[in-house]
Amino acid sequence: MNTPRIFTRRSLLISAVLTAVVLSVFYPVAGLDFVHYDDYVYILENFHVRTGLLLSNVSWAFTNVHSANWHPLTWISHMADVELYGLAPAGHHLSGLGFHVLNTLLLFLVFRSMTGATWRSAGVAALFGVHPLHVESVAWVSERKDVLCALFWFLSLGAYLRYLRRPDRGRFLPVVVIYGLGLLAKPMLVTFPVLLLLLDYWPLGRFRPAAPAAAISGGRANPVALRFLVLEKAPLFLLAAAASAITFVAQRTAGSMQMMGKISLSARLQNAVVSYVEYLKKTILPLDLTAVYPHPGNGIHLGKTAGAVFILAAISLAAVHWRRRSPFLLVGWAWFIGTLVPVIGIVQVGPQAMADRYTYIPLVGLFVSLLWSADQLTAGSPRRGWQAGVGLAAVLSCLMISARTHIGFWRNSHTLFEHALEVVPDNWAAHNYLGVVLEKEGNYQGAIAEFSQAVRIKPDYLESSINRGLVLAKLNLPDEAMKSFRQALHYNPDSADILNNIGYLMFRQGNADEAIATLREALRHDPEHAPTHYNLGAILAAGGKTAEASEQFKTVVRITPEFPEAHLSLGLLLMKTGSRSEAAFHFREALRYNPGEQRAKDGLNAVLGRTGE
């Protein structure tokens, strides 16, 4: 088959320009800090990531769910950054930028290979590279999974094009392998097999009776039965199903789907259609972007939903109506709609209504529709090239300015969440995150004020009530802390987190029996809740029930091996009961996860008979 050469002088020049343009916009990310919005949980406070690329850490990445996610390649990527740069944020940000530049170039090369349209493919890549909606995926270190999974998305697409030049099972294997690696970075790639069917329709023309002149086939494509095209991709569909199942179990087990039970299916569907239109609006006019768009719950106005349904239906009908004359409209629109399905909120995970990061791959479809439509509309114009160039340059200039401005809001946690509150004043999620920042800085009164604001706006928001109660307890205000926990329990009666905190506070107030009963109730709701097992063990140990306490601590280290306090407590108990070798093991584990723990050092020296160390 006749295919365009990938590395021509023109393509190399365009690639160099694209690289320069993207870097000119995004290079300030090197000066950004980590933010108190997953970066600490993912990297700075994650023992397995912050200790680097060790074999044990790689094993952990494949065998554990952390932060409601199972994405081992993403964890390994963060570990590799720690090996290269330590825990300084600049290197981690630059790695993310490097992936984004590479994705931009791959997008250009893949579309040029598929369509033979050099300048339109370059335009799509340029829009992708500088659009402000992509700032979050690049500027937020924890969203490494976005840029990493997109890398495998485009590589898989390139492998698919290679397969089509000489189809056989052996040449399809790289598609399956690369796609599988992408799913290990982020399961959002589950829609990729369906996307390939769309591309088979256009521009590859593999099942249209009147196929367009696709560059991959060097002319008119040979139509293939749709059934064959689906069966051809069966391995990809199986991988997608497996990844979907693993993700569902991981997120449900971690409790990140709690909000789904509080929001009706109809409200989730309403939010989905409204979010689609919001994404469209922000693609065209990227203003008021923020890291936190709080979910409206069951309060979406029916008129707003009806308007969104009308807009989506009108665009969809137009794309179907013009599919013969302009198949790129249907494919681009379906790309946008379809790739957002896993994150559109029908299965609600987390407190957000939508997120800029979710558009990283979906926007490609809109850019394809835009560039190919512009080319079709200007066909026959004597100034076609000049008009297209000036128009694209003007659009890119505006997007570049907007993206640079938005990057500034990611400078640190304060600027990020204060900006979120400027965009959405009653942003209960942003109030909560800002409260966490203030607490870590030691500004407890400011933290309480932010948590209280979040609770005022959304009384059933579990996290804010718990956070406020914890700070009040830290300030030795047990009655006020208990009131905050009780308020949270009213809205979330089955929450092990709340019951655990109430039980521990009861113990601090001298009510050991009531505390134990409350903690056992928490474990009835969540038998694998490690903090509750630890607190129950501590209370039992204080009451002299050594054997029962040891069992609780053993359960903790089974569930969460990187829990140094549990290893220390278990070591101290075992040292009293004569199990000195086992006690030594747990003291070593406590020191492994917390090298500065002096009590573990003293305990280890004692069981080994050392002195003066």
Image (tube, helix red, strand yellow):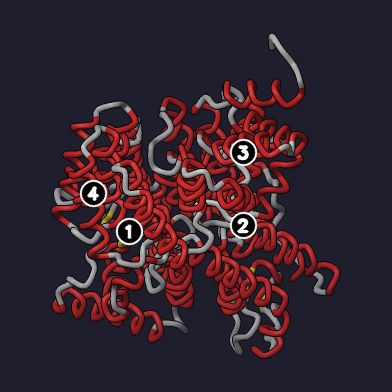
Residue 310 on image: x %, y % = 23, 81
In this view, the residue in front, 168 or 588, is 588
Q: Position of residue 56 (x, y in %)?
A: 73, 42
In this rendering, position of residue 372 left or right of residue 232: left
| Element class at badge 4 | helix
Task: Name the mark nearer the viewer: 2 or 3.
Answer: 3
Kindly report the distance in space between the C-alpha atoms of the residues bearing marks 4 and 3: 30 Å
Give the mark nearest the N terminus, 1 or 4. 1
Callout 2 environment at 10 Å: few (<14), some (14 to 19), or many (20+)?
A: many
Q: Quadrant of residue 562?
A: top right
Are discs 4 and 3 less than 8 Å apart at CB?
no
- Measure the alpha-carbon separation of dots 1 and 4: 24 Å
Residue 573's disc is: 3
Which residue: 65% across, 27% down? 84
Instruction: Name the residue beneath numbered marker 4.
Output: 482
- The amino acid beneath tag 2 is Phe
Q: Look at mark 1 in the image and give the residue it sits on.
A: 351
Badge 3 or badge 1: first in the primary sequence? 1
Name which of mark 2 and mark 4 comes first in the sequence: 2
CA distance separating discs 3 and 1: 41 Å
441 relative to 219, above or below? above
Mark 2 = which residue? 154
Q: What is the secondary structure assignment of the residue under circle 2?
A: helix
User: Which element is circle 3 on?
Assistant: helix
Question: Residue type at mark 4?
Answer: Met
Does 316 appear above or below 514? below
Task: Judge by depth and name the residue closer to the eye, 63 or 302.
Answer: 63
